[in-house]
Amino acid sequence: MVEKLSIIIPVIPADMKRKIDEIRARSLEDQSSLVRRLLRKSIAGEKLDIAVKDYVDDKISLGAAAAFAGISIWETIDELKRRNIGLRYKILDAQEEIEQLLLRHQVK
């Protein structure tokens, strides 16, 4: 399947361009592919940061944080441990996790 592409033309500082060129020289990727890969990683990291912050601020459940970050609940728990953030598991979280498991396994 071919990925649909959109055009964005960012204006970046010269030092950032030099860093991209340094990476490109070692990765042997064309500039567009490299920038897309870097953006994917950055977006994933930013989504994870937002999910963790919203979870810590009690704005979203553990399951919602995992879903927003695009990772499993278990990966979210591991990330919370890496960041020395305690788990606040609630009944709502357990219900949400059970519902996700049932949906995944097509149990009704």
Image: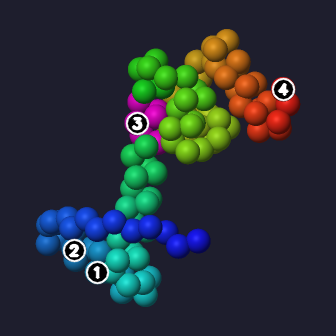
* Disc 1: which residue: 21
Q: CA distance from mark 3 to mark 1?
A: 29 Å
Residue 48, relative to residue 9: is it above or below? above
Residue 78 visible? The answer is no
Q: Earlier in the sequence, mark 3 or mark 4?
A: 3
Please give the residue where the numbered disc 4 appears in the rendered image: 108
- Residue tagged by mark 2? 17
* In front: label 2 or label 4: 4
- Residue 75 at x, y percent in the picture: 63, 42
Bounds of the magenta span?
A: 48-53
For marks 2 and 4 on the same chain, the one whose residue lies earlier in the sequence = 2
- Category of crowding for the residue at label 2, using alpha-carbon neighbours closer than 10 angstroms: few (below 14), some (14–19), many (at least 20): few
Q: Main secondary structure of the magenta part?
A: helix
Expressed as whole percent of the image width and height from the top left, the position of residue 19 reads: 27, 73
- Does residue 40 sit above or below 103 in this rendering? below
Q: Tag on residue 50?
A: 3
Kindly report the distance in space between the C-alpha atoms of the residues bearing marks 2 and 4. Answer: 53 Å
Q: Nearer the viewer, mark 3 or mark 4?
A: 4
Q: Secondary structure at mark 4?
A: loop
Residue at point 85%, 30% (across, down): 107
* Disc 3: CA contacts within 10 A as few (<14), some (14-19) or many (>=20): some
- How far, Cα to Cα, is label 2 from label 1? 6 Å
Marks 3 and 1 in Cβ contact (< 8 Å): no
> Do residues under tags 3 and 4 come within 8 Å of each other at their CB atoms?
no
Q: Is residue 27 visible?
A: yes
Mark 3 and mark 2: Cα distance apart in space = 26 Å
Q: Earlier in the sequence, mark 3 or mark 2?
A: 2
Residue 77: percent from left, percent from top: 62, 34
User: What amino acid is found at the position of numbered circle 1 in the picture?
Assistant: Asp
In this rendering, would 102 be left or right of 84? right
Q: Are marks 2 and 1 in contact (CB under 8 Å)?
A: yes
